[in-house]
């Protein structure tokens, strides 16, 4: 294998291309927009290598009805989106069965093992280690009852090796000043880091791909080409491009490319928002996660970013300013001293989410030459570097000790 086309210049596709180029492949990355300028530009910046608990935990399911009924809840499904969302939500409920939770957690642990070091390896090679900070992450709870709702998820994380230190109010204050007194309990994750500029991060990886001989082109891929049952290239920008293998890493738009080949994947676009405050006057040292709001408050180069909310809607539906406004309320509730008058216009992006949390990775058995790497959901940044390394090794060798079977596209039938 010498020529590989990677469809998608988000952080996942770029990390795949980076590892393929380092392994000696001739790589071309195609996307309709510039590297990192889609969903990857707006993520929360968290590197959460211990996040092995699936989204569909039994405790989470019990909270979903309340979220949906709360106009200001962290989860919303617009009325017009319900017909399309119901099949996905049913699969999501089935993924919360105990045997499924254990299967998913094992797969996530395999994928995220050493994630921060994988990111550091890339950034060190590109001379940009300053992008990654090791200050941990701090989850915030109002009381013991609220913490108890997440007991199963924390237990699962600990079983897979994550260090988590429970703090009382004094412990929170010793770690971070200025947090609202309503939050009485903290869970500190000392081994988790964050990226201080996700867009610059993606651009650094893109430059690395080009440094190693790869090509990055602005062109929209309209179709995958197949001859004699095998994928042999793509149709992009009005021309035909040939390759020995094609990697689909197009985020929320990946399923559309696979459908004409007979592969149907239940991929949902869970829309997330962020607001950036350049001069907040209250800057934490690490990401703060108020558990009641499911938001991330992250210190970055350009100010303070508040990211979160889950809106299940069509990928092409217009954004909702009301959902973005909730993030400023979240920030006020956690850091009362924060100044919001410098807040920039909100941003919205599409998280590519699968109902069982696990991404799709590996070669499609029914379509040789077609490789997949998408559906990393809320962990796209975290998983990008280890996913790129795993996929490149599967494509170029030598074989890894653990295969990509947990992430196979065929698990959806």
Image (cartoon, rainbow, N blue to C red):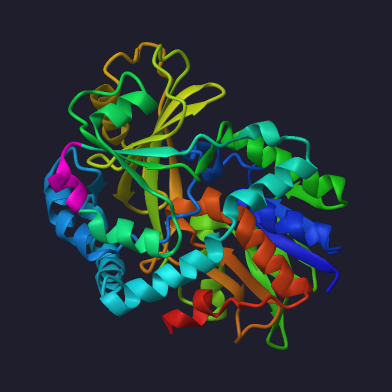
375 up-or-down from 393: above or below: above
Is residue 137 left or right of 61 when viewed as pictured?
right
Q: Name the foreground residue: 360 vs 181.
A: 181
Residue shown at the point (44%, 64%) measured from the top left? 160
Is residue 185 left or right of 271 when viewed as pictured?
left
Observer able to see residue 255: no
Give the x, y percent position of residue 181: 20, 24
Q: Name the foreground residue: 134 vs 277.
A: 134
Give the mark count.
0
* Image quadrant where one finds the N terminus: bottom right
34 part of magenta stretch: no
Residue shown at the point (69%, 79%) measured from the top left? 226
Q: Name the foreground residue: 179 vs 279.
A: 179
* Image quadrant where one finds the C terminus: bottom left
Is residue 179 left or right of 233 when viewed as pictured?
left
Give the x, y percent position of residue 405: 55, 80
89 up-or-down from 171: above or below: below
Observer able to see residue 143: yes
Dominant SS in magenta: helix
146 part of magenta stretch: yes
Q: Quadrant of residue 207?
A: top right
Give the x, y percent position of residue 97: 26, 75
Q: Quadrant of residue 96?
A: bottom left
Give the x, y percent position of residue 98: 27, 75
Q: The magenta stretch spans which residues? A: 142-148
Residue shown at the point (24%, 56%) measured from the top left? 151
């Amino acid at each position: 294998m010498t020529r590989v086309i990677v469809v998608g210049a988000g952080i996942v596709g770029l990390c795949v291309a980076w590892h393929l180029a380092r392994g000696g492949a001739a790589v071309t990355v195609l996307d309709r927009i510039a590297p990192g300028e889609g969903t990857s530009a707006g993520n929360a910046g968290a590197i959460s290598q211990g996040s092995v608990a699936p989204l569909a935990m039994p405790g989470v399911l019990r909270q979903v009805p309340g979220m949906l009924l709360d106009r200001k809840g962290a989860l919303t499904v617009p009325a017009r989106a319900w017909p399309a969302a119901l099949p996905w939500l049913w699969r999501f409920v089935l993924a919360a069965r105990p045997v499924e939770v254990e299967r998913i957690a094992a797969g996530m642990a395999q994928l995220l093992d050493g994630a921060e070091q994988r990111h550091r390896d890339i950034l060190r090679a590109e001379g940009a280690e300053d992008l990654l900070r090791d200050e941990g992450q701090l989850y915030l709870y109002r009381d013991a009852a609220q913490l108890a709702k997440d007991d199963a998820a924390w237990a699962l994380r600990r079983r897979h090796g994550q260090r988590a230190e429970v703090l009382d109010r004094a412990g929170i204050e010793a770690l971070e000043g200025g947090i609202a007194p309503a939050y009485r309990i903290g869970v500190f994750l000392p081994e988790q880091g964050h990226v201080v500029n996700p867009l610059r991060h993606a651009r650094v990886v893109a430059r690395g791909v080009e440094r190693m001989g790869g090509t990055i082109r602005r062109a929209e891929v309209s179709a995958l080409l197949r001859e004699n049952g095998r994928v042999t290239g793509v149709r992009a920008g009005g021309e035909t491009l040939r390759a020995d293998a094609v990697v689909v890493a197009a985020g929320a738009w990946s399923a559309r490319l696979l459908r004409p080949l007979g592969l149907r994947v239940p991929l949902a676009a869970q829309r997330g928002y962020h607001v950036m405050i350049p001069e907040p006057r209250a800057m934490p040292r690490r990401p703060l996660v108020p558990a009641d709001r499911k938001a991330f408050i992250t210190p970055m180069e350009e100010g303070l970013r508040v990211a979160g909310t889950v809106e299940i809607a069509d990928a092409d539906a217009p954004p909702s300013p009301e959902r973005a406004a909730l993030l400023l309320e979240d920030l006020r509730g956690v850091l009362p001293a924060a100044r919001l008058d410098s807040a920039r216009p909100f941003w919205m992006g599409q998280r590519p989410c699968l109902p069982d949390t696990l991404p799709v990775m590996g070669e499609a058995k029914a379509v040789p030459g077609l490789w997949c790497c998408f559906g990393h959901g809320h962990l796209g940044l975290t998983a990008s570097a280890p996913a790129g390394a795993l996929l490149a090794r599967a494509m170029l060798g030598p074989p890894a000790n653990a295969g990509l079977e947990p992430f196979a596209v065929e698990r959806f039938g």
